[in-house]
Image (tube, rainbow, N blue to C red):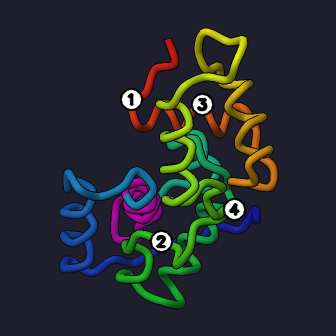
Amino acid sequence: MGKKHFVELTKEEHKKVLDTLNSKIASKTVKRRCNILIMSDKSAEKPATQEEIAARYDVTTVTIWQTIKDYQIRGLDYVLRPRIHAKPPRSPVVDGEAEAKIVALACGKPPEGFARWTVRLLTERVVELQILDSVGRETIRTTLKKRNLSLT
């Protein structure tokens, strides 16, 4: 990792990187990659070292090395594209049907002996009615909050 890596951007590529960097729709990660490419560009006066780039943009040298390697192997278009995952890393616990049942339960009459629903009571009732196999209080709370539903 101590070895310096350089990028040689053509004028068209340099313009494309600057346009992406100044774009309002580009993500923070893509803009960071743009900065890495510009700082390590060999056609500039003196390219910065990986350590200098890492300190300036608060990234690791591995990120810089990987960005430059992607540029050298896969090209500029690959480096500047946002990474979109086909499916989220974790699937949602509550689907639409379960959410509708939870909201209907919360809007209904509270159990006997209670003046109103609490998140803890709702969590117990959801498991008891087998709407979900197991669920945490925070999941119930965020489900209700998403629908602007207050238990008070």
Sequence-earlier tag: 3 or 4: 4
Q: Position of residue 140 (x, y in %)?
A: 63, 36
* Callout 2: SS: loop
Q: Closer to the camera: disc 3 or disc 4? A: 3
Q: Nearer the viewer, residue 108 or 120?
A: 108
Q: Mark 2: which amino acid?
A: Arg
- Which residue lies under the disc numbered 1? 148
Q: Looking at the image, can residue 144 be seen?
A: yes
Question: Residue at coordinates 40% horizontally, 37% vertically from top-left?
Answer: 147
> Which span of residues is magenta-colored?
31-45
Sequence-earlier tag: 3 or 2: 2
- Label 3 environment density (alpha carbons within 10 Å; few <14, some 14–19, many ≥20): some
Q: Is residue 152 left or right of residue 137?
A: left
Q: Mark 3: which amino acid?
A: Arg
Sequence-earlier tag: 1 or 2: 2
* Callout 3: SS: helix
Sequence-earlier tag: 4 or 2: 4
Circle number at residue 141: 3
Q: Closer to the camera: disc 3 or disc 2? A: 3
- Which residue lies under the disc numbered 4? 62
Q: Nearer the viewer, residue 126 or 95?
A: 126
Q: Is residue 152 left or right of residue 133?
A: left
